[in-house]
Image (cartoon, rainbow, N blue to C red):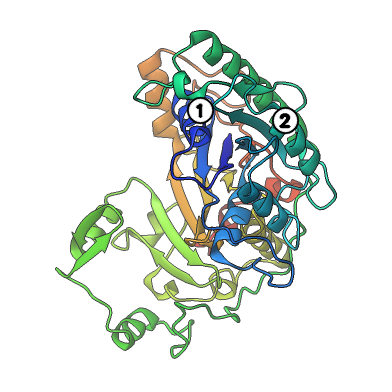
């Protein structure tokens, strides 16, 4: 389960930030929590629409894709901070990421009563038209005397307080599961699989379907290769090292950008006929419509469904098990959305691999075995579910997806 936590203060020193960071660390086995800041969100002014600003769009994208939201609110003059109120104004003006989204409220303050009044006001705001959040009833976590509540490492010292916080979070997890059943995915617009909407990184001078696209495009943009160093987020590698690293992955990896152009696959040295998703060098740079050109219209719709589902944030990923594989193979495809720094959709990272050896190894190491389903053997996968999303749910179209619905299908 993926949750986001919103720090309801724009102050550099915030006990509500400490509270969310404690939740993130202490309960990391229950859910994934990403803490979001509102420091850079401009003051709300409907005459100067900032809905497309980086700060607002970033929050919108993160909240949209999350299964639920935890807001940690301070209390200023018996209500929320102006910064939090302004943020919620922007996120209910032209953008509406909180609509039908499960939200939990927590808060920390200097005084005994915690943030009780601010939480009452925040509940009213979240229930307002334009916001329409599903706020968890009851389960009020009010952390008073915040200065004394944390130790030097940022941990809550009182065990009873931690136990009560855990009970509230457990209830929220259940609440998210209930509310997720009411979620209506955004309608999927027709996908342009012909790369007709170039993006900043598109190389428009070369025809995407040119079989020599890679060499021509590389020459055009003076692409580096060989022992030239590339500075990554957390590393410094040469192009050769980067290629070795990616080719050593025990998976088939592909990338198609948000203009639906197929730009990369690893293991180029491998015989295409031995791959779980056949790829050839000439496909690099191709339009997705060309990559999937041999598919019948019904299966092309599956391609559009996968892309549209990830683009809309209806699901964080789509997973499929390709039917008809031999007993020694569980042909697994994972389509994962990728994102730009502002949180908007940047394309699909597809991972293809045989899950069977991993499953057999796990069963052997743990002394377990699979029961039920169809087929023989301890690792029978006949009853495996075909798809799952960020909240372990997938649309009906997902059940029909197969290997040919991915970025690298043929």
- Mark 1, secondary structure of its residue: helix
Separation (CA) of disc 1 from disc 2: 22 Å
Q: How far across and how far down the image is residue 49, in percent?
A: 69, 70
Q: Is residue 307 above or below residue 335?
A: below
- To which quarter of the image does residue 299 belong? bottom right
Tell me if residue 40 can be seen.
yes
Q: Is residue 315 visible?
A: no
Q: In this view, which residue lies farthest toward the bottom?
A: 205
Q: Which mark is residue 117?
A: 2
* Residue closest to the eye, 354 or 179: 179
Residue at the spot of label 1:
23
Chain-order first, disc 1 or disc 2:
1
In the displayed orientation, state which residue is furthest to the front: 77
* Mark 1 surroundings within 10 Å by alpha-carbon count, few (fewer than 14), some (14 through 19), many (20 or more): many
Q: Residue furthest top?
A: 160
As drawn, 69 above or below 380? below
Q: Residue at x 44, y 14 (%)?
A: 157
């Amino acid at each position: 389960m993926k949750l986001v936590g919103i720090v309801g203060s724009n102050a550099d020193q915030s006990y509500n930030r400490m509270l969310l960071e404690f939740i993130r660390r202490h309960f990391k086995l229950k859910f994934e929590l990403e803490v979001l800041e509102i420091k850079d969100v401009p003051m709300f002014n409907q005459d100067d629409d900032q809905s497309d600003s980086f700060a607002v769009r970033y929050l919108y994208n993160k909240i949209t894709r999350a299964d639920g939201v935890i807001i940690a609110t301070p209390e200023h003059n018996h209500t929320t901070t102006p910064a939090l109120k302004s943020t919620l104004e922007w996120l209910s003006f032209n953008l509406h990421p909180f609509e039908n989204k499960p939200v939990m409220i927590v808060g920390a303050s200097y005084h005994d009563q915690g943030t009780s009044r601010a939480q009452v006001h925040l509940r009213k705001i979240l229930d307002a038209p334009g916001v329409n959040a599903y706020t968890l009833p009851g389960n009020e976590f009010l952390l008073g005397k915040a200065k004394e509540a944390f130790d030097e490492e940022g941990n809550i010292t009182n065990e009873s307080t931690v136990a009560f916080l855990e009970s509230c979070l457990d209830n929220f997890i259940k609440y998210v599961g209930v509310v997720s059943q009411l979620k209506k995915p955004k309608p999927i617009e027709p996908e342009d699989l012909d790369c007709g909407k170039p993006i900043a990184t598109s190389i428009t001078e070369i025809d995407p379907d040119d079989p020599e696209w890679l060499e021509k495009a590389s020459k055009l943009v003076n692409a580096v290769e060989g022992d030239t160093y590339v500075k990554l987020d957390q590393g410094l590698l040469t192009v050769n090292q980067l290629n070795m690293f990616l080719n050593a992955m025990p998976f088939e990896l592909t990338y198609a950008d948000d203009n639906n152009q197929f730009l990369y696959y690893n293991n180029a040295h491998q015989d295409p006929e031995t791959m779980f998703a056949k790829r050839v060098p000439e496909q690099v740079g191709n339009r997705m419509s060309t990559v999937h050109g041999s598919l019948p219209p019904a299966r092309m719709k599956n391609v559009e469904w996968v892309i549209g589902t990830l683009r809309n944030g209806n699901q964080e990923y789509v997973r499929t098990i390709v039917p008809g594989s031999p007993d020694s193979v569980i042909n697994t495809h994972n389509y994962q959305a990728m994102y730009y720094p502002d949180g908007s959709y940047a394309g699909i990272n597809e991972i293809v691999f045989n899950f069977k050896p991993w499953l057999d190894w796990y069963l052997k190491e743990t002394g377990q075995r699979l029961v039920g389903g169809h087929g023989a053997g301890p690792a029978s996968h006949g009853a495996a579910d075909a798809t799952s999303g960020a909240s372990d749910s997938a649309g009906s179209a997902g059940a029909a997806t197969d290997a040919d619905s991915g970025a690298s299908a043929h």
